Image (cartoon, coloured by chain):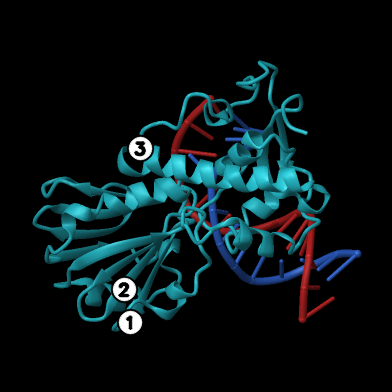
Chain colours: A cyan, B blue, C red
Amino acid sequence: MPELAEVAFYCSRWNPGWGERILQVRMNGQKRCFRSVVPSRLSERLLENRVIRSLTHGKRMLFELDRRLWLGIHLGMTGSLLIRPPEAELEKHDHLALETRVGWLVFNDPRQFGRIESFESDTLPEFWRELPFEPISEKFDFHYFRKFVDRGSNQPLKSMLMDQSRFPGIGNWMADEVLWQSRIRPHRPIAVLGEKEVKELFRAVKRVSQVAMARIASDFSDPPKTWLFHRRWKAGDNCPKTGVPLNRENIGGRTTCWSEAWQR
DNA sequence: ATGCATGTTACATG
DNA sequence: ACATGTAACATGCA
């Protein structure tokens, strides 16, 4: 489920482990999540090390450790982070587990679309500083938005919103929510929108991102009950505004949920 | 059994 | 070169 706010939530689950020495490393290096690293090397670097702090950006997480080590984690479609009690048994899809005094810092991912990376650097790795502004950043303002929004101006808005180089952190449900809240159909490209609609789209991007962070990032509580969010998961549910059944359609390779009567 | 899933990317096509 | 579309990845669930 991880998009912007869920990623922030999962990332913070490792916070109790900050500053704790890593006593033991368990990883299954065969798993797909380790395709970008040399597992034995990473394991070696993690042992006796400690997490100092963590950062998130869109759907990415970055953990700073001692000895110039930075651990990058992307949760993919089904990844999550958690801490298991010290005496707990590890589970089937716990692909990376770091034992500390407070328990096991675990990366769990059934489908293994997630990815573990590692970097060596004295300071924040270069690539991290070059990432685009997140929609929750105050630097992500209308001027910034207007500038990149014209690129690929014929692609459906649904695809544009899911483009991580422009809207880092926005995924399938957030894109549907933004379009529903701005009352614009997902198929339409930015090029055909009126200025008023462009502004509305921008406002919805900011609102959905901010409210999602406020609700989900700290304790994984639900988004507002008025949101499309609660109706978009199974076929046959109704639009919260019109009460009419929602449309489901594949756009840009993803199942898209939208309301014909509500969105224009 | 069949189809689908909150993501990314390598490859193919235009 | 670029823009867009599709298949593939691995597993669980309805």
Q: Of the residues shown, which amino acid type is indicated by label 1?
A: Glu
Residue A190 drawn above or below residue A186: below
Q: In which quarter of the image is the C terminus of chain A?
A: top right
Q: Mark 3 lies on which chain?
A: A
Q: In this view, does A150 lie above or below A248?
A: below
The spot of residue A207 in percent (x, y) is: 52, 42
Nearer the observer: mark 1 or 3; the answer is 3
* Mark 2 belongs to chain: A
Residue ID at (21%, 81%): A67
Question: Viewed as shown, does residue A108 lie left or right of A139?
Answer: left
Q: Which residue lies furthest to the top in this view?
A: A243
Which secondary structure lies at badge 2?
Answer: strand
Q: Compared to A189, does A62 lie above or below?
A: below
Distance between the alpha carbons at the discs numbered 1 and 3? 32 Å
Give the crowd class for mark 1: few <14, some 14-19, many >=20 residues within 10 Å: few
Q: Do the residues labelled 2 and 1 touch (CB within 8 Å)?
A: yes
Q: Which of marks 2 and 1 is nearer the N terminus?
A: 2
Q: Is mark 1 on a helix, strand or loop?
A: strand
- Co-location on one chain, circles 2 and 3: yes
Label disc, if present, on residue A70 of the rendered structure: 2
Residue in front for this viewpoint, A30 or A13: A13
A131 left or right, relative to A243: left
Name the side, left or right, on which A76 lies relative to A185: left
Who is closer to the viewer here, A40 or A258? A258
How far apart marks 2 and 3 lie (CA) works out to 26 Å
Return the mark for residue A220.
3
Residue A68, image x, y percentages: 26, 81
Question: Which numbered disc covers residue A120?
Answer: 1
